[in-house]
Amino acid sequence: MESETTQRPNVTRPAWTLGIILSLALPVSAQDLNARLLEAAKKQDAAQIEKLLKQGANPNTKDKNGRTALMWAASMKSTEGVRALLAKGANVNAKDKTGWTALMSAARNGQTDAVLALLKGGADANMKDNNGWTALMSGAASGRADVLGALLDGRANVNAKDKNGWTALIVAASSGYQDSALALLKRGADANARDKDGNTALSLARKYNYSAVVAVLTTFSAATQQEIARKPIPQTAADASAAKPGTPSSIPSPSSASSPSSTSSPSPPGSAALVSPAQQNLNQQLLDAAQMGDTANVQNLLQKGADVNGRGAFGNTPLMYAALTGHADTARLLLDRGALVNARGNTGRTALIEAAVEGYADTARLLLEKGAEVNAKDDGGWTALFWAAFSQRTDVVRVLLEKGADVNARNKYEDTPLIRAAYRGDIATVKVLLEKGADLNAKDNTGKTALIEASEEGHAEVVGALLDKGADLSIHDRDGNTALSLAEKHNYANVIALLKKSETIRENSVKGSAATDKPEISPAKTTNPPSLPTATPALDKNAQGQAYFRMGLNMRMIETWWSRTSDVASGWALSLHRDLQRTAAPSDLVTLASQAQAYLKSQPKQGLSAAPRLIHDLRARLDQFCNAHPENKFFYAAGGFTYQLTLLSEALETPAKAPVKVGDTRREILPLATTMTEQCLVTEHCKDLALIYFSEAASILKKPELAAADGTALLNDAHEIEKALEGEDH
């Protein structure tokens, strides 16, 4: 064959062979066009999308996960690309392997214009994915109220539920988006809807400490929503004549209840009287003047007959408005003219609670002197002291305690003011509460104490104060976590040291020793000042980012696998060691990585006794080094995040073999998902190569329930991110 080819280099092929070649080439060309169309959609290149469509690219082409070009364009702020694809016949309601649609993608990524274009193109706003997730739920997870408005205008079912019973309102509340929650409530969302576990939007907002969402939801109680839904009642002459100045006004126009200064909130149940328009106007002026602290005008309006106890938005009185804006002089005048000091708004809040939330100590003191109930609770069981502690209003906390506030009051979730203050890391308030006898070891309904909350959040100063008062280290929450285990989980070195030191002292005290020994500290202390860097050739910007990504990735793999396959973990430690040398890391950190590599390699002979502490110290010191370099901090975090995506995908696809549990891993990385996407967007190199994969992973992680197909998609995202950011480990 070789000689024949040499002798006849210019043989003319028969026409039929050219026909075969051309016929075989056509499908390849079409495949290439389709692949390029998907890439253009991912890169937001509308001009290229139009060009490829004109050349014959299939507008309904899909990638291996079933995602169409329309889905990619919809999620990537390419509205012109969306329109071009729709004009060429793209299936607007096509689904990927998880049941996701282009409308869901656009909604999840907050692309309002794309949502509008898709709806105009015939998108079904009520389609569901494999878990029952709708576009409205996706929009709720984006935090964009305008997206929700567009979907609701497109006839989205505001109270649709997924397989877990989640509604769009529950999604918004559990994500901390108060504007979205408010938008949904205004359009008829059921605030009392429960998921399969019995959670409501309000209970989840409270669980995750989204105070602004809690305020919105408690304001829009079920009664409020019912009133908002009613049509205004026509006012008769008899009704108008029945209303007299000085009597409590009820509310004639529920439709405007969303305005903070409106008088159109629902009246108390059973009240049917309506006031005249003139009286309404007078009462409204009084509410506005009280909120502004215009004391002279308040006095003038009262003389004209404005109702001192008239109700405004959400059932608030003029006194409540004066209290929440801290106008003590105005509040005093209102009280002197008969304002009810313990009147409650629709959520059960009193004027004292309003002053406590906003931190107005002088106003709170005045209200208490005038007979305010210091331990009155709102509908959530929160007292003024609760709100002051949670809102970090230490001066108000002191005033309330001086006037007899119950330092150990509990709300519906068995929280105490101390637990809330510890969670917020408010050392000043914690000390005041402890001085007044707060129960150190009180547990909430999840079994968490103040010490556990402070340890989990990394508030070392609060942890120290609680330990000094004798907080119990051995208490565990209902998931089996202790203060120490949670601090170790999050690698809070200072908190860990405090807890271990206290534990050692108490153990020695029990044994009758002097109890002055310090806890054992490994040779590589995280508190050591950085030592001189090792000599290494300088890396360019891209190479540095790649090295930091690999360090985050390798550290996470070491932590996951050292106890299972220490020889493999040793290899990752070696890679980490090399990158530390390349990045001119401090010599003590390089040495620590070398020690970990050697120890893990020799593990079969020596056992694992020292590994946990060694790896913990390596992580703590590595965090300290990498986080001190803002320009590469993102890449380091991205490396760890990417491997966690891989672990989660394995747990979803083969749960019996995976080294982690779906729930734990998801809870750990869910808060990072949006942050990673946002940081990638503003990070050179990442935006062009990996943004779409971070964005898709964030969208998947926001789903209330994940399936095996989601695991496949997450694994693909992880591989693509790794390919884009890791580079080569030379």
Image: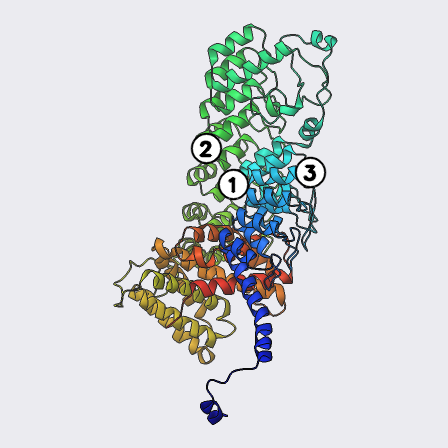
Give the amino acid at mark 2: Arg
Q: Which residue is drawn at 69% across and 41% down?
A: 157
* Residue 302 picture location, percent across and down: 55, 9
Q: Which of 322 and 265 is in front in this view?
A: 265
Q: How far apart in space, not on screen, are marks 2 and 3 (Cα)?
A: 31 Å
Give the amino acid at mark 1: Arg
* Residue 204 picture location, percent across and down: 61, 43
270 sits left or right of 315 in the view: right
Q: How crowded is mark 3: few (under 14 residues within 10 Å), some or many (20 or more)?
A: some
Of the numbered discs 2 and 3, the one sitting upstream in the chain is 3
Secondary structure of the residue carrying numbered label 2: loop
* Residue picked out by circle 1: 420
Q: Residues within 10 Å of mark 1 (few under 14, many from 20)?
A: many
Give the amino acid at mark 3: Asn
Count the numbered circles shown: 3
12 sits left or right of 517 in the view: right
Figure quadrant of residue 315: top right
Which of labels 1 and 3 is toward the front? Answer: 3
Figure quadrant of residue 232: top right
Of the numbered discs 1 and 3, the one sitting upstream in the chain is 3
203 sits left or right of 450 in the view: right
Q: Residue at x 36, y 72 (%)?
A: 594
Visible in this render: residue 142?
Answer: yes
Which of labels 2 and 3 is toward the front? Answer: 3
Q: Residue at x 63, y 39 (%)?
A: 412
Figure quadrant of residue 97: bottom right
In the rendered structure, find residue 393 and report the number of the disc placed on it.
Answer: 2
Assess whether mark 1 and mark 2 are in contact (beta carbons under 8 angstroms): no
* Residue picked out by circle 3: 192
Secondary structure of the residue carrying numbered label 1: helix
Q: How crowded is mark 2: few (under 14 residues within 10 Å), some or many (20 or more)?
A: many
Q: How far apart in space, not on screen, are marks 1 and 3 (Cα)?
A: 25 Å
